[in-house]
Amino acid sequence: MQTYIYGFPMMDLYRTLWETSFDPDRDHDRTLNEFYFFRRLVTHEDTWVVSPNEDTIYHRAFVDLRKEPVILVIPPMGDRKYWFPLGNMFHDFDGHLSWDTVGRGGGSFALCPPGWTGVLPEDVKRVDVSTPIIWILGRYAVNGPDDVSSATALQDETKLIPLSQWGQSGATRPDIDPAAYPALTRDDLTDARKYFTTLNQLLRMTSRQDHPMDVAMASWLREINMDAAQRFDWDALSPEAQRGLERAAKEGHRIVFERQPRAVPIVNTWQVARLPQDFSKEPVGAAGGAMLGLLYNPGVVATYDVTFTDETGTSLDGRNRYVLRLDPPPPVNAFWSLSMYSAETFLFVESAINRYSLGDRTEGLVYNDDGSLKIYLQHQKPTDPKKRANWLPAPEGPFYLALRHYSPQAPILNGDWEPTPVAKQ
């Protein structure tokens, strides 16, 4: 069970890699080592990532660096805010390239795997990452649908180029062999045979060097023949060991699922996520966080508040009426937004007004004279026009909320600003 929980962030992340890069049942035209550009805002019809936002457009890539470094090219951005968090396959972060750390001019950055030695071109900066396979989920801030075309023009200039092709005209597309990557789907996350066999393969494909958690887990892995230096063989296990691992997969998944509402500290019924760059040192919290919101940001990029309940601790349900008073709204350098999700699908909720979130860039919001803001959460459309302007539509059943703060200011990071609880009307 320890092994199941320890491996869950990597397994769910790799599941996303395989489904979005190789799954023949999905409609995709990109593979590893190239960006998939999402050229529109996310809607309720998108299922490729849980708890998405509609404040940015995404550019997603899984990058296999086992052959050579790959150079990330970020174009000059002007006033456009952007973020490129770089994460390893354990869902920890190796850094972020953004308007906070790089600035308006962009640049070229060589993503180098552990132990790589070599010479880089003069105009390329070295960035060391901690696993041979990594992920990037770049984000460009977008101020509504009318701003999408300007942002997608910058996507066209955002590139991943193998070091061996740097400086050449017309770099070729990656030549990736799908057979070299084991298949893994969402259903496989509760299939003990598939789960533990694939985890053993991944520990060889994309291992870390001397991480304390890996060292601590080594004896557990060896005990069930899952050490990275061993080839795990389900059929060689005794019937008792097989039953034990089947139970571990079932119970481990249940533990991770039930940890979601308390993956991080709770303040005023909200989970306040000020996530460290090295979250895997807390395996249960990291697994719950990954299940709730895969490909999230570290606190230096963005912070999150998530709630499933009202001020009494009762689960939020769209058949009731609620109000959230932000007094004051979150202090940020970029933007804040409040998003609505189904607690059954973890995706956006379809609504008659096509509103999945609202925030400081939403036109027409009605603020109080003291600068505070009341947001109304319910399934039925409010009859009061002022409430309707501040209405975030809920499903007819259970839901949860995510309050995002991009480039948060100090009061959010040090706890001086806290979200207020959702009140039932």
Image (cartoon, rainbow, N blue to C red):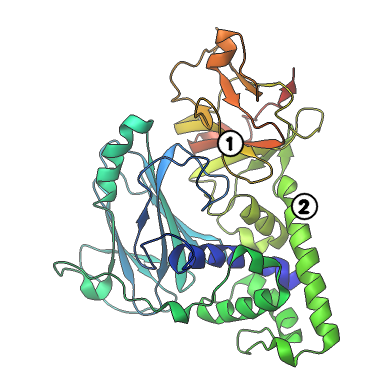
Picture disc at residue 177: none
**Real-space Cα separation, disc 1 to disc 2, in angstroms:** 22 Å
- Residue 48 in the image: x percent, y percent? 51, 53
- The image position of residue 136, as x and y in percent, is 43, 58
Q: Position of residue 284 (x, y in %)?
A: 72, 59
Answer yes or no: is residue 1 visible.
no
Residue sitting farthest toward the bottom: 236
Return the disc, 1 or 2, that comes first in the chain's sequence: 2
Q: Which residue is mark 1?
A: 349
Q: Can you say which quadrant of the picture contains the N terminus?
A: bottom right
Q: Amino acid at mark 2?
A: Glu
339 or 106, which lies in front?
339
Question: Residue under circle 2?
Answer: 258
Residues at badges 1 and 2 in contact (C-beta under 8 Å)? no
147 relative to 292 in the view: left or right: left
Q: Under tag 2, what secondary structure?
A: helix
Towards the viewer: 192 or 66: 192
Q: Amino acid at mark 1?
A: Val
